[in-house]
Image (cartoon, grey):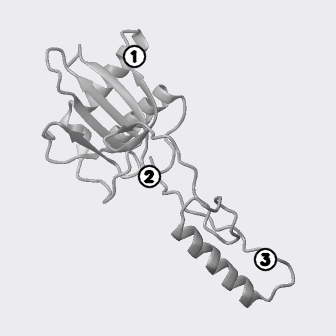
Amino acid sequence: MDKAQITVLRLQGQELAPTPTATAAPTLIPGIPPELQQMGQAALQGLQQALPGLIPPNLIPGQTATAPTLPAQPRFKNFVILQQRQLTTSDADEELKDQILDVFGDEDSFTADRGNCFYPGLGISIIRPNNPTPVDLLVSFSCNQAMGDGFRWPYAVNGFSPETHQKLSEIYQQLWGQAVPPGA
């Protein structure tokens, strides 16, 4: 594994779903009673449903605004990638590789102490020489555990010991230049 190619990914563990926002309901024509305003809005909405695209979006007051379409974000194991980095042969990166392999290669790094949640803030993809199948790891700091994908987890437990949590937090700091954010 010392010659393995390692890619590390900073992940967004919890993804917030975009919520549609309703625009304020101003009056269509000032001075018209609210009952007639509502009837007019209902008629316009019915027309919009019958002939989609006829009335430009947000023309009808009180209509739910259509959320702008965001470009698809790159993902790792269905979690949004915020940043990624391939570890090179530089001395600093070789040290990080050794630290990562030491943590995940030692059964004593893991305990049964883990949360009942999983919001990974760090992904690790390891490609071994002469084996194109990656070994993928997801690390959830806030839930105190790791999970593997593409292989059978080699240990009976996957929660972090206090020392492991500290080591992985330091690795995260070295990789991204910031402390592990809450919820990662």
Q: Quadrant of the N terminus?
A: top left
Outermost residue to the top: 90
Is residue 144 positioned above or below 116 on the image? above
Q: Is residue 22 left or right of residue 34?
A: left
Q: Position of residue 95 (x, y in %)?
A: 37, 17
Secondary element under disc 3, as helix, strand or loop, is loop
Q: Measure the alpha-carbon separation of dots 2 and 1.
A: 28 Å
For marks 2 and 1, the one nearer the N-term is 2
The residue under label 2 is 14
Question: Which is more toward the observer, 138 or 82?
Answer: 82
Closer to us: mark 3 or mark 2?
3
What residue is rendered at 25% in x and 34% in y? 136
Q: Nearer the viewer, residue 85 or 92?
A: 85
Q: Viewer-proximal residue, 136 or 111?
A: 136
Q: Position of residue 65 (x, y in %)?
A: 62, 62
Dot 3 or dot 2, earlier in sequence: 2
Position in image of residue 146 (x %, y %): 28, 43
The residue located at (34%, 24%) in the rendering is 7
Q: Secondary structure at mark 2?
A: loop
Mark number for residue 27? 3
- Helix, strand, or loop for circle 1? helix
**Three-letter amino acid code at disc 3?**
Thr
Residue in the picture at 29% in, 29% down: 125
Count every numbered label the image shows and give the total: 3
Q: Which residue matches tag 1?
A: 93
| Residue 138: quadrant of the picture | top left
